[in-house]
Amino acid sequence: MAFIICIETSSDMCSVALALDNNIISDKRSSIPNIHSSGLTVFIDEVISHAGILLKQLDAVAVSKGPGSFTGLRIGVSVAK
């Protein structure tokens, strides 16, 4: 059983999903412009809470690598780190 948090910030869409054994069990997304920096950590908290797990239970973090907005990608990788 592996929990993977998936982060997408390379486009106008900002999204976070939580996968358990290759199945999405929770997700949050928004196409509101420029929400990446203010919304990403909130989305992560909401997805984790909805699934009823703790951050320390995550087995991996997946981040989109582009192509896309440099700023968006930088935000995604920084938050993942």
Image (tube, rainbow, N blue to C red):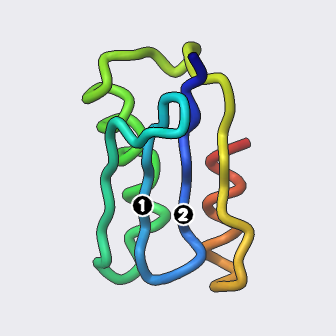
| Labelled pair 2, 1 in contact (Cβ < 8 Å) | yes
* Residue 8 versus residue 60 in the image, above or below: below
Q: Secondary structure at mark 2?
A: strand
Q: Please tell me which residue lies in front, 25 or 49.
A: 25
Q: Earlier in the sequence, mark 2 or mark 1?
A: 2
Name the mark on residue 52: none
What's the residue at 64%, 85% (across, down)? 69
Left-right relation of 47 to 40? left
Measure how far apart labels 2 and 1 are at the Cα level: 5 Å
Q: Where is residue 20 shown, x and y percent of the image? A: 48, 29
Q: Secondary structure at mark 1?
A: strand
Name the mark on residue 8: 2
Going by the numbered disc 1, the residue's amino acid type is Ser
Residue 70 quadrant:
bottom right
Name the mark on residue 15: 1
Q: Please tell me which residue lies in front, 64 or 73.
A: 64
Left-right relation of 2 to 65? left
**Direction front: furthest residue:** 22
* Residue 40 versus residue 55 in the image, above or below: below
Going by the numbered disc 2, the residue's amino acid type is Glu
